[in-house]
Each structure stands twice: as C-alpha cells, then as structure tokens.
Amino acid sequence: MSSAVHAQAPQPGPDATSTADDLLVVRGLTKRFGGLVANRDVDFDVPRRGIISLIGPNGAGKTTFFNQLTGMMPPTGGTITFNGVNLVGLPPHAIVELGIGRTYQNIRLFNDMTVLANVMVGRHARMKSQWYEAIFHLPKVRDEEELTRGRARELLELVGLSRRYEDSLARNLPYGDQRRLELARALASDPLLLLLDEPTAGMNPGETARMTEFIGRLRKELGLSILLIEHDMKVVMGVSDRITVLDYGERIAEGRPEEIRRNPKVIEAYLGKQANA
Amino acid sequence: MNEPTLGRFYLRALGLGALGAVVVIYLALIGMIDRFEARNIINGVLTLGVLAPALGVLIFAYRSTQPPKAWSFVPPAGHVIGAGLLAGGVAGLISAAFLFVNEAVALNAVLVNATPRMTDALTLGAGLPTGAALLVGAGLVVGLGAAALRLVPDRFRRPLVAALVAVLLLSLMEPFLRVVLLQLELPAIAHWLYEAGGLTLQGAIVTFIVVLAVRLAAEFRGNAVRERVDAMPAGQRRSLQIGALVAGLVILVLLPQIIGSFLSEVVGTVGLYVLMGLGLNIVVGYAGLLDLGYVAFFAIGAYATAILTSPVSALGSELAFWVAIPIVMLIAAVSGLIIGAPVLRLRGDYLAIVTLGIGEIVRILLLSDALRPWTGGAQGILQIPPPQLLDIEFFRPQNLYYPILAFAIAGTFVALSLANSRVGRAWNAMREDEDVAAATGINVTNYKLLAFSLGAVFGCIAGAFLAVKLGSIFPHNLNILVSITVLSLIILGGMGSIPGVIVGAFVLVGLPELLREFAEYRLLIYGAVLVMMMLWRPEGLIPSAQRRRELHESEDDEEQWDERVGAGTPPPVVEGT
Amino acid sequence: MRLRLPERLSLVDVILWGLRVGVVVFVVTGSFATLSQGLLGFDSWRSLVIVGLAQGAIYALIALGYTLVYGVLFMINFAHGEVFMAGTFTAFFAATALADAGILNANPFFGLAVILLVSMVTSMIVAVLLERIAYRPLRRAPRLVPLITAIGASLFLQYTVRSIYGSGVRSYPRIDILVGTWDIFGIPIQKTQAVVIVAAVLLMIGLYIFVQRTRTGRAMRAVSEDKDVAAMMGINVDRVIATTFAIGGLLAGAAGILYVFLFNVVSFSMGFLAGIKAFTAAVLGGIGNIVGAMLGGLFLGLLESVGPFLFLSGFGVPSTNQLRDVVAFTLLVLVLIFRPYGILGRKE
C-alpha cells in the first residue's frame, strides 16, 4: 500500500475448518425482494483470524449478503451469529460496536468532510463522550478528541495516506486514496471482522498486489478476520483460506482455493461464464 | 473572430438588456421604485429608488460584456463597450416603451401600482416624452459603467466594488448609526455624515476614498494586518482573539444604553431570531433535517411560558419567569422528541412537508375553540409578567435585551462546542450519507432526536422571550412565515455557519425593522433570497469553515455550477439587502 | 428462527405503534359517539358528501400538477399552489371586464370560456417560467436544494402577486346560469357543485388519455422512467419536462376557475392552503401516480368535509368546522409517516 507496508507474503491462516468457536456463523440466511430471491438458505462461517472470500457472478447476492451482516437490510429468514451474539434485528450501529467494519463496492465516503474527520467518524463507536459533556468542554472530552485524532493519524499512516492530505476533503482524493481512506475509516472502529467489498476494483496490477499484501498484513498484525468480496481471481486465490461461491443467491460451493479452482460447478457458473463473456 | 460570433455576442447583449428592462418594469409594478424614492442613499444625488433598478440593469449589462466561456471568444475593448451600451440602452428603451404603453392603456385597472406616480418615479418626475429620453440616457450610462467595470483589471475592480458596497451599507445603516453617533455625543460627525435619511455627499466621497485606498493597499501589498496576525506566535494570537472577544462583549453589553429604546427593541427581536436560527441550524445545517415546522417550538415555548406565568391563565400557577424557563426547556425537549420520533424515518423532502403540517396543526389548534380554556383561542393569553431578577424588572426593551443576549451567547457557545465534537461529526456524517453513517457506528435515530430536541429547546427559549417581550401571546404571529424567516436567514448566512446565522438575522430581520421601505417587501425579499442563494451561492454569505473548504478546493464544481446557471434569468431583487 | 427480542423493538417503534392505535381509537370512538347520539342525519350526510366531492375534485386537479412534476423530476414543486393562485387571480380581471361589458351573463358560455382560457394560460406561463428560471439550473443539485428553491419561489410569487394586484380579497362577479340547483335523481344539487364535479372528471379523463395515448404522453412516461435513457432514445428531456409543467399549470388554472365557482373569492394567499391539500391528495394516492392523485383528491375532499364533524362532535368539541384544516394536515402527516408510498402504492 505504501512505504509503510513492506512487501510480505501472507502467512497461511490457521486451519480453517469450521469449529464451534467460529467468529461468524450464518445459518439458512434468506433474503427476498418481492418475488426475487437474493439469498437462499445460505450457510457460512468465518473462523477467527481467517480470510474468507465470497465470489460469484454479478447479481449473485454478495453485496446483499454483506448488507444483512451489517444490519443495513433485515434478512427474511435465518440466523447470523457473531462472536456468540445474534445479529438479526440489531441496528447497524450496534453491529459496528460488536466489531464488524466494512467498505463498499462503490466507495462511499463522507465526501464533504475532511480526510481526518472521515477516520474520526469511523472511531465514533469507540468514543464515549456524550453531548452534554461536549457542550462543557470537559477535560475528558478534550483528551478523548486528542486520542482519537492521534489514532486516526496512525490509521492513515497504516493505510499509506500522507499526512498532508488530512485536511483535504475526501471528495478531492484520487480514486486509489479514497479506497485507502475507506479502509482506514473501517479500521477505526477496531473491528474483529472486516468486510471488504471488492477492495481492488478499479486498481492497476501494482496497486492490486499491494492491496493483497496489505490484507494479509491486517490479519497478521491486527489479528483481524476478513471477509472479502472480490472479482479478481488472482487476489482471491492468493489471499483466501477458504472460498464460498454464490450463484443466484445460493451457495454452490465452499472449500480451499485449490478445491474451488477445480470444482466443475464453479467453473460452469462463474469462471465458465466469465470466459465466455 | 468570425462575424457570427460577434453577431451572437451583440444579440446576447440585446437579450440581456431586455431582461434588465424586465427587472426595471417588475420593480416599478410592485411599487418598489416609488416606495424607495423616499430613501436617500446620498442626499441630493441618489435615492434607493434610482439605485435599485440601476443595479438590476447593471448586473445584466455587466454580464453581457463577457461571452460564455464555451464561445472561446474574447471581445476587444471596443466591443465590450458596445455590448454594455447596447444592453443598457435596450433596457432603457424598453422601460420607456412600457411607460408609453401604460399611459395609452391605463394598466392601473389591473396593476395597482401602474399609476402616474410610478411614471414619475421612473422618470424622476420629468413626465413622459422627456422622461423617456432620460430613461434611455440612464440606461446608456449604466451600460457604460458596466463596460468600464469589466475593463478595469481585477485588482482594481475588487477594491472599487468593495468601496461602492461600503458606501451603500453605511448609508443603509443610517437609522442605526445616526442614533449611535448622537448618543455618543458626537453630533458633529452625525451631521457631517448623515442628512435626510442618507449619507451626505462629502460623507459618501470620503467613505468611498478611504475604503478604496485601504482595499487597494491590500491588493498591492497583501493584507498587512492578516499577515501580521498570521505571523504571530500562537499564544499571542490567542490573546489577541480573546481581546477581540472581550471588546466585542463590552460593546454588546453597552449597546442598549447607546442605542435607546426603539433600537434595543429591534436588536431584541433580532436576538430572538438569532436564537431560533442557532436552533434550526443544528437541525438543518448540522443534521441535514429540513424542518419547516420550526415555528411549532416557538409557539410551544411562548404558550408554555404564558400559561405558567400569567395570572389569567387556566393553570394559575403564576410562576416567576426564571422558574418557568427550566420547565419550558424541559417541555421543549420532550416536544422535540414527540414530534421528532415519528418523522425520523422519512426521506428529506417528506420530512420537510410533514414538519410543515405539524407546524400548521399546532397553529390551528391554538386558534381553535377546542383548546380555548387553556390557550384562549384567537384572544390569546394576556398579562404575561416580565422577568424579574432581584429588584430589576426586565420590562423595558433595554433591560430585556440582556437576558436575550445572555441566552444567545450561551446558545452560540453550545452550538459551537457541539459542532466541533464527536456529536457534530456524527451529525455531519449523517447529513452526507445516512446509511453509511449508521454502518459506521452512529446511532442515527438518537442523533436525529438529539438534533430535534436541542433545536426545540432553542426555539422554545426564543418563544418564552417573545411571550415576555410582548406581554401577551396570540396564535396569529406564530405561522409558517416564522419558520420560513428562520430558514431564510440560515440559508442567507450559510447552512451550518454560526456567524452566518447572526448576520442573516441582522440582515433579514433587523434591516426591515429599521428601513420601513423594506418592511412591505420583507417576504418577497425572503423568497428571492431563498431562490437566488440556491441558484448562485448555496453555501451562503458566510460559509462555515467546512463549506468554505468545499468551495475552495473544488473550483471545478463551482465553475460547473456557474455554467449550469449560464444565462439564467435572475429574479428581480432589491439590491443592498 | 428465534423470536425478536423485546429490546430490539426500539422506542421509535413503540411511539409509532402508540400513534397508530391512538388515531384508530380516536376516530372509531369519535365516530361512534357522534353516530349514536344521532348528530348526523341523512340530509347532512348527503350535503357533506356532495360538498366534499366537489371540493375533492378541485384538490385532485391541482394534485395532478404535483404528481406529474414528481413523476418526471422527483421533486416537490412547492410553488404549485401559487401557480394555481396566479391564474385564478389574473382571470378575475378578465371576469370583471366581461361582466362590466355585460358579456358574461349575455353570453355565458363564451364568457366562461374566455375566463377559463385566461386562467389556464396564465397558470401555464407561470409554471413554465418557474421551471425554466428556478428549477432547470438545479436539476442535478442535491435533493433539498430544489425544495428550498421551490419554497422561495412560492413566497416570491405570492408576494409578487400581492404587490402587483393588491392585497385585498376580490369577489368574482355573479354568473347567473350557475345560480340555483338541479334535481338529479330527485336529489337537489347546487349547479356549481355539479358543474365542478363534471368538469373536473372530464379534465382528468382527458389527461389520462393524453398521457396514455399520445406521443408526448409516452415521452413523459419515458422521462419519468429514466432521463438518461430517454435522452439517448432521442427524447428532448428539457422539452418534455417543460411540457409537464405546462400541463400541470393548465390543470391548476382550470381548477382555479372551478374553485371560484364554489367559493367566489380570490386573494394572493389562496394558493398556500390549496397547494398543501392538493399535495396531501397526491401523496395519498401515491405520488407520481395519476389515477392515485384523482382518487386521493376525492378522498381528501370527503374526509375533510365529513371528518371534523363525524370524529369530533361526539366528544362535544365546539365549532368543529374550524378544525377542517387540522383533519387535512393530520391526514398528511399520518400518510407520510405510515404510508409514504400512498394508499394505492406498494412499498418500494
């Protein structure tokens, strides 16, 4: 991602077979929009410190799946258990507090806020000062602001955004930097699980490679679990412990990268189609 | 420089000149020119009745002297003058033609202001055949002025415009400044500067020269003061800021003693609107919730105060004002929650309409016989006692000014503190993208309710002061127009900007109180302000730091905005408001 | 599937449910009390319904202007009430001139046609200018910007008319052929009410056919689906939008004359309330939905006419008629809160 991140091959994660202690356990998740079924009976697990990829053709229901995990859409049926807590029915902010952070397929920053403010908003869930305390400028409010500012700067450095951008508006950043900023914002909430929706979309091969390394580093250094939606097979195969394939809202395959690569159903549904396109 | 482009250039000037004429005729038909004749800008030289239409034409003529960027055509000086003259001349010609038509057809039967008085006002009393020539001549002069303004290099033009605006402002401030000067026992200056409701000629000239010189110096040698302040060490700068703050406070505290009863009353009214502006600014400017029913809180505050304190109310508790205020604030917060909760999930424009509906419901209920036992129906509640502190009764406007000032300062402090905190950031994020804000960890529901409730508290305090200021309260002055006034002053000043709220309140509420000529056109001007600000300067006159940055950094956007507005017709407007 | 835990039911949900239950209980007990006390006889029912339908037909015509514009631009043209007012007020001068010349009652059909034409054309011009000057430059601006502009335009138009035409309330001249009642199936109906209902229905049918059958109507529907695609298919989007405003203006102008048949007076401030109520009607029927606007208008008219008495007099509330507007506004608030997609519309 920048000089701050040294090129390091991702370490193979801990063995990623499903255990009772998995960080995220999804069972029978179903989402209908009128007659359309976006997710049908999806089972899904993310082990602790695992990197799991979710792939599938466009319209397979991947982003809908993310939206249900983060509480932005209520599921029609099924359970989502995160760290032992049922997420169904919880509002998005409560899910952030429990430790899920995300980025978006089409970058969604707070465009008219500064870069630093974007990251500080990301930290909102971990801050405690209340409005009545803020009104009176209590020392603890000021201390917390300072701490947050410092933490935000660290994160900007971690994702490789230069300090001199910190007062620019998010909208004025170049595309790649906007992706980094979004990542920094997501990291600011100290998530246990990070959901990345096509983090390398629109990046050139060099940037993509650095992003791939960075994802590995996030697990290694911050101990995060990562759930990834990605179209770039090189990224998916390179970084994931396990891969789940969705097609027409249904899980059609699950396994290690090499298994998925050989799975005829996947080749037909996904890779085959893409080859034909 | 091919001929067609030149032809189009002049054709455009012709069209813009015609639009200038539309402005002049519009101002005449709404009776503004006639009414504004009474207000001197420079005594014996210029009245507002002449200045307003002239400015209208000037804007179009100025515009006509520069073709749109897309034409990639830079007219030489001769053609710039040509276009200006054409636009101004056409404007004068059409206006004159309109007067002839009016004389022939007697439009007065339909248009109440199309009277001989209007003709007199437009022709400066010269009557028709002569006056028509006068109008065309005036148009040409204005057109020439526009061309000259275009031809002057930027670094001269800016100081020139600043100096002209300064003269105008100083003149419009006459009702206020003259009283201040006289009270300060400086009658010599007052008489030297002001005369017959406007500036004296010497006053105008000196003001013009001084401002011009200062601004020119700033253009050529940089802004020395600003630079020196910037160069100061942080501690020193901070003490300078504190010094300025203290000086400002001292002036504010002494103000009512200087300006007397009438102006204190006006400033008190402005103060109420500052309070409401601060409150609505939290709701609209910070949290991005367009609330058109803000008057409901103003009304609730006023009525709650009246019912709690008045000896003739049904409750009969006769509390002292200072005891009532905390109760009113509590009622405000709760009513903010009650009104806020059901509407939270609505999309922006529906929220606006629903809140408008709620505001109207509150007003009609107050007016109805159904609630008469408590609210007195159309007769309202009388005998609201003034606040009392120790032995001082805050009855006279000069006294009531102080509690209003105290609350306004406290309100400013609260609003500023919140804006620069975790809360303010959360509101901003919510305003920009509600879904993402929620998924970033912000409890959107709570923050919306917080904004609503805080806004309600500000509105209710303003209402409480309205009740004690008037001594009685009726539903009639609690209508949708209050909401729109507050919205207008926020938009004029700049959404999210606290200095903007204060300036907006002074301009939109204070000025019409001082200049009776404006009072009649108050709401018309609010409407024009809303439209024009949205079209040309959506960030307001004094944008908040953040909005200024948006503007500063995305110059492309601003250009696009200009492009899109293009040759759009501005609605006619009173200049100098 | 696990049951939703109680703590996941938020405070806002509780308040909303409380509001729902409260409104239903209030309306039901109020109506029951009124009916059981026999406060509302057959004759009053009949006249309230006819008044409501006539009034509602006018709301429906104005509502069409909101719905059409919303259909193509997704903005609330807050100034539409002023479009209605401007035409009606202007036509007043034509009406007095015709009456003074004796034409209005000597040749009533010609006279009425002229008045109608003046009103419709004026409203149309105002609507088109409004779009061109105030809304077109803001088409890509954030959603609240055009709304604020529309509020400003509304104020501006209202007080421009006040300054130009004067601030007084003006009475239209009497139109002799509309005085009196007709017996329709043995029910006496005031001629004005009958004319209003029939004329409004005819206009609405005309509009429906226009939108469904003509080229321009199809272009309007294409633009409301997707402006960019429509533009790519060779539709002049600017012109279609201007046409939409023009049609909304024509209907509002016509509604103005019908309004005058019922109420006789015009003033610069008449547009605000009429506009808000018509907007309520449009939302009630699902904004953007033409048939919905018509039904919404009729429903609102009926409710406003029958509602205050039916719901409130049972509780012994005095002068319920003062609360007509409260009924309308309450309906507006409740519809937007609980069914913002309208009574006919479906969620999403």
Image: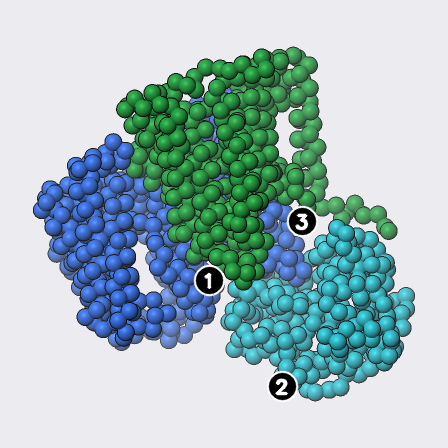
Chain colours: A cyan, B blue, C green
Task: Return the mark for residue B547.
Answer: 1
Q: Is residue C108 left or right of residue B95?
A: right
Q: Is residue C29 above or below residue B102?
A: above
Residue shown at 43% from the left, 72% from the top = B234
Tell me if label 2 and label 1 are in contact, CB under 8 Å.
no
Q: Is residue A156 left or right of residue C319?
A: right
Residue A172 visible, this angle: yes
Judged by depth in the image, the label closer to the viewer, 1 or 3, is 3
Q: In which quarter of the image is residue A216?
A: bottom right
Q: Mark 1 lies on which chain?
A: B
Q: How far apart are marks 3 and 2 (CA)?
A: 47 Å
Q: Look at label 2 and name its amino acid.
A: Ser
Residue B552, percent from left and from top = 43, 68
Q: In which quarter of the image is residue C56?
A: top right
Residue shown at 75% from the left, 50% from the top = A34
Residue shown at 89% from the left, 69% from the top = A18
